[in-house]
Image (spheres, helix red, strand yellow):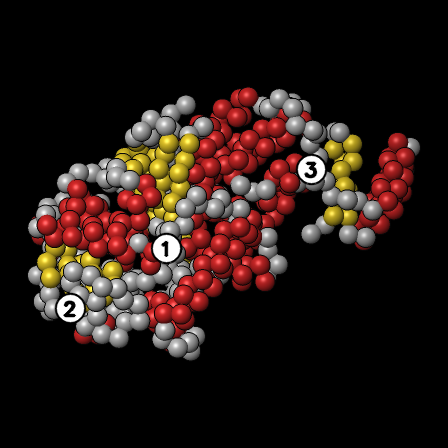
């Protein structure tokens, strides 16, 4: 079956065909580990997880790399402002030392990985750290400088965007529309040739004179820019060219635009086949963001009593390229839907041969640019089809959950207390005798004990009320 994905660069759906004919090489921009991830960040990693699961569902081999940024990501996402890692030291009242930065990075890396586990997100095969790849970054910058795309100032080494005619191809912007220094805390290097020129390497000078992490380089002591990190790590662990590069839609205009410029300036050819981007998660009318303080962490979701997989279900119910507006009411709905799904599955028999037609429809849905809302609709349609045997449905659900990742293979029937089961049996006897008054009384008695009895064509169904 053809598997098509929307390529941000070409602005159309394209069939996924591994460049080497065997293995899909996937690079995903990972977290900057200066704080906890919020659920807007996690929505992007959920979409990337569904992507990987779908590729494996279609029998592709996958090599999945996700970086950990532990240096060089400045507050503006461009090349200005304070390093997010160093800013976090001040926030947490830690001494400005390399040891403190490593402790901080490790703490938030472990918290991030715990969030992935809670959401049933598959762990990437490789999780490279930026600080472990500085020599590769320096080598890449030297190539760009040799090719005439980089220049040096007293404060930094910059990429010369006017030397790269297709610089805005990914975003579709015009170069003059590129905004730089949009936040109050940023500063702009007056020696830059063009406002959109971005830093490849920061010297330990000017406002960065006291930068805690620094390395020797041909341009003096300093540290790498954020964008060069992903170029170097993707080349190191996947090689150029590779198949898929993913991230949030906020990466389109700056980070991924700059990666393309760096890669192609260094090697003179296209280095990524398809670019995929997930849409924002909004909170109210605003994008969820740490910089504005409008965000919800996964721990907040858990503290309110929700299963983390209810949030996964919520995300699956909206296409990854459509904005999703988060509310606690919406999460309530997702939690209830997940409970109903698990209850429906618990009543099915032992897995056997699956439901071929529904499995085909499911594959068509996810094969069309990861259409998870349609895939969920196929799942519910199959479960509500009373002409299909339960054991066949269970087998198909097991296949579907290879992509959905909702833990449905672990679903077991609710344990109903013996006294409630006895009450249900007595009620059935009353119904056989057409003693409707006694039947209603026993139903109300079960309800008072917290259990709901539903009469179906297959007999009574009892479940605990929520």
Quarter of the N terminus within the rendering = top left
Q: Nearer the viewer, residue 316 or 154?
A: 154
Q: Position of residue 425 (x, y in %)?
A: 87, 38
Tag 1 or tag 2, which sits nearer the N-term?
1
State the image quarter where residue 92 is shown. bottom left
Count neighbours of disc 1 (C-alpha within 10 A) and say few if under 14, some if 14 to 19, many if 20 or more: some
Classify mark 3: residues with Cα within 10 Å, few (<14), some (14-19) or many (20+): some
394 or 217, nearer to the observer: 217
Where residue 155 is drawn, which disc sits there? 2
Mark on residue 395?
Answer: none
Element type where label 1 sits in the image: loop
Based on the displayed image, in which of its 4 quarters is residue 392 positioned? top right
Q: How far apart, in angstroms, are the residues tagged by discs 2 and 1?
A: 25 Å
The nearer-to-camera label among 3 and 2 is 2
Q: Position of residue 201 (x, y in %)?
A: 20, 61
Helix, strand or loop for disc 3: helix
Q: Say if residue 262 shows up in the picture.
A: yes
Q: Which of marks 3 and 2 is nearer the N terminus?
A: 2
Name the residue: 86% across, 35% down.
Answer: 428
Q: Distance between the residues labelled 3 and 1?
A: 42 Å
Q: Can residue 434 be seen in this view?
A: no
Determine which of the numbered discs, if any, sits on residue 346 in the image: 3
| Residue 129: image tag | 1
Look at 37% across and 55% down and name the residue there.
129
Residue drawn at point x = 27 percent, y = 71 percent: 211
């Amino acid at each position: 079956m053809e598997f098509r994905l929307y390529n941000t660069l070409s602005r159309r759906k394209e069939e996924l065909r591994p460049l080497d004919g065997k293995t899909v090489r996937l690079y995903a921009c990972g977290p900057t580990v200066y704080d906890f991830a919020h659920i807007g960040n996690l929505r992007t990693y959920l979409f990337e997880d569904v992507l990987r699961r779908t590729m494996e569902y279609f029998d592709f081999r996958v090599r999945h790399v996700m970086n950990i940024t532990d240096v060089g990501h400045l507050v503006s996402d461009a090349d200005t402002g304070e390093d997010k890692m160093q800013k976090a030291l001040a926030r947490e009242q830690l001494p400005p030392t390399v040891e403190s930065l490593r402790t901080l990075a490790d703490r938030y890396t472990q918290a991030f990985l715990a969030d992935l586990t809670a959401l049933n997100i598959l762990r990437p095969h490789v999780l490279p750290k930026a600080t472990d790849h500085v020599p590769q970054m320096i080598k890449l910058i030297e190539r760009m400088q040799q090719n005439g795309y980089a220049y040096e100032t007293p404060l930094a080494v910059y990429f010369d965007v006017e030397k790269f005619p297709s610089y805005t191809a990914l975003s579709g912007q015009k170069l003059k529309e590129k905004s730089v220094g949009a936040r109050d805390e940023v500063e702009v290097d007056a020696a830059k040739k063009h406002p959109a020129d971005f830093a490849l390497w920061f010297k330990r000078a000017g406002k960065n004179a006291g930068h805690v992490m620094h390395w020797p380089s041909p341009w003096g002591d300093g540290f790498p820019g954020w964008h060069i990190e992903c170029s170097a790590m993707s080349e190191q662990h996947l090689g150029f060219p590779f198949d898929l590069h993913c991230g949030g839609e906020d990466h389109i205009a700056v980070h991924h635009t700059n990666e393309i410029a760096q890669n192609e300036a260094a090697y003179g050819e296209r280095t990524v086949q398809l670019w995929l981007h997930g849409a924002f998660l909004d909170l109210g009318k605003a994008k969820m963001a740490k910089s504005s303080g409008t965000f919800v962490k996964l721990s907040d979701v858990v503290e309110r009593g929700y299963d983390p997989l209810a949030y996964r279900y919520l995300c699956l119910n909206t296409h990854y390229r459509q904005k999703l507006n988060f509310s606690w009411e919406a999460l309530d709905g997702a939690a209830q839907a997940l409970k109903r799904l698990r209850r429906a599955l618990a009543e099915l028999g032992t897995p056997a041969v699956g439901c071929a037609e529904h499995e085909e429809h499911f594959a068509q849905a996810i094969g069309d640019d990861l259409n998870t809302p349609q895939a969920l609709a196929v799942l519910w349609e199959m479960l509500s089809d009373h002409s299909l045997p339960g054991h066949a449905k269970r087998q198909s659900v097991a296949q579907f959950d290879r992509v959905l990742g909702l833990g449905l293979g672990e679903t077991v029937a609710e344990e109903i207390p013996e006294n409630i089961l006895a009450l249900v049996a007595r009620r059935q006897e009353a119904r056989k005798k057409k003693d409707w008054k006694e039947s209603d009384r026993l139903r109300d008695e079960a309800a008072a004990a917290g259990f709901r009895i539903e009469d179906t064509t297959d007999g009574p169904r009892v479940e605990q009320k929520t």
